[in-house]
Image (tube, helix red, strand yellow):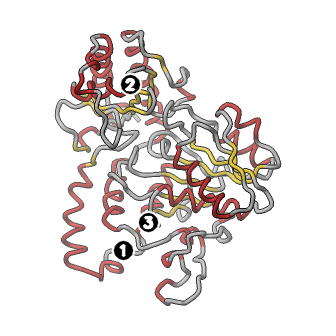
Amino acid sequence: MSAEYICKKNHFYLPDDLIYLDGNSLGPMPLKALEYMPSVMQNQWGEKLIGGWNDAGWYDQPIRVGDRIARLVGADTGYIVTGETLSIKVYQALAAALDINSDRRVILSDNGNFPTDLYIAEGLIKTLDKGHQLACPNPEEVEDSIDDSVAVLMLTEVDYKTSRRHDMKRLTEKAREHGVITIWDLAHSAGAIPIDLQGCDIDFAIGCTYKYLNGGPGSPAFIYVAKRHSNIATPALSGWMGHQAPFSFEQSYRAHEGTSRMRVGTPPVLALSVLEAALDVFDGVDMHTLYQRSRVLSELFIKEVMGSCPSLILASPEKSELRGSHVSFYFEHAFSAIQALIDLGVVGDFRAPNVMRFGITPLYLEEADISLAAQKIASVVNQGLWKKQIYQKKGAVT
């Protein structure tokens, strides 16, 4: 597949004269979603009203959309379900994993994991009150920390700050040798890099859809459950849509067969419809080719930024195969520099305390965008544009 074919910039709504390097945080709006939603609103919700649950396929939508994500993450159809938020899916996966390894008490993560995952683990530990412990060594020390005391290995494949990439296959193999259940967070992986959940023999995986999958702000998350667990995993959040027969309205809960037991409440039909349309962008896209293109663009970006901005320090791994699809730099004045850069038409983002982060998304970025962005970063940093008072004020979301 050629690089020209992969770039689908004309499939997205992107403001003129804007270089968007923040798809790792929120993907831009696919035009297909914009075109599709009026039909959903009028022809489904408007015309069918409650009949849409059957006639428009709303009830089956969480599995149908999950099947489309499956191709992008190396899973068979039927083992991914969508709905709720990533935090909910982390809770579900971790609770089920701890129940499977009920005689062990250690949850192994790392200190670079996204805070939500760690917060959920802390909260679940308190709720269970069975003496579980959360261990968070440095990322490079995780492999040596896997032993027979560990119940669950819970990691985010691509570090949200630095883009450092864990070796999913190697770590999962070691976990399997020690009887450890694995949970992989794909928030910064899905839609960006090749993933092989079944080939790596993963137990559980979760991920969000508003980053590289371009599902829109707050779009539903997904959970993957390996076939061997799909009929035995305990659904800790036993909502009515995970019931074997939800419309029988039985007083007691009976878990649905398969991954559908991980459904919780009424699915967010409109949000899932946006996501369903957004996934059309990936039709015909090979994830290996997409990632190779990302590596080429990332190398160009690093070369040009580092060549012109000696005060920036590369926070991401130097070797492209060890990175996800974003590139980060350390800079003392990272927040204000990002604000100044946005004013110049280049959107990146800031992560506390001193990280400038840039998503490299070949679906809508080309070499010219990368080179111009690097030039503007140099202007902001070298000319001290970040010093202006207007760029020092922080909003509720940074």
Mark 3 sits on what residue? 64
**Looking at the figure, which quarter contains the N terminus?**
top left
Per the model, the C-alpha gap separating discs 1 and 2 is 46 Å
Q: Are marks 3 and 2 in contact (CB under 8 Å)?
A: no
Q: Which quadrant is the C terminus positioned in?
A: top left
Q: Residue at x 44, y 67 (%)?
A: 62
Q: Three-letter amino acid code at disc 3?
A: Arg
Is residue 184 toward the left or the right of residue 342 in the image? Answer: right
Which class describes the residues within 10 Å of circle 3: few (<14), some (14-19), or many (20+)? many
Percent from the top left, x then y, of residue 359?
39, 33
Q: Secondary structure at mark 2?
A: helix
Q: Which mark is residue 225?
A: none
Q: Mark 2 is on which residue type?
A: Ala
| Cα–Cα gap, marks 1 and 3 | 9 Å
Q: Amino acid at mark 1?
A: Gly
Q: Which residue is mark 1?
A: 57
Look at mark 2 in the image and give the residue it sits on. 334
The answer to which of 26 and 66 lies nearer the viewer is 26
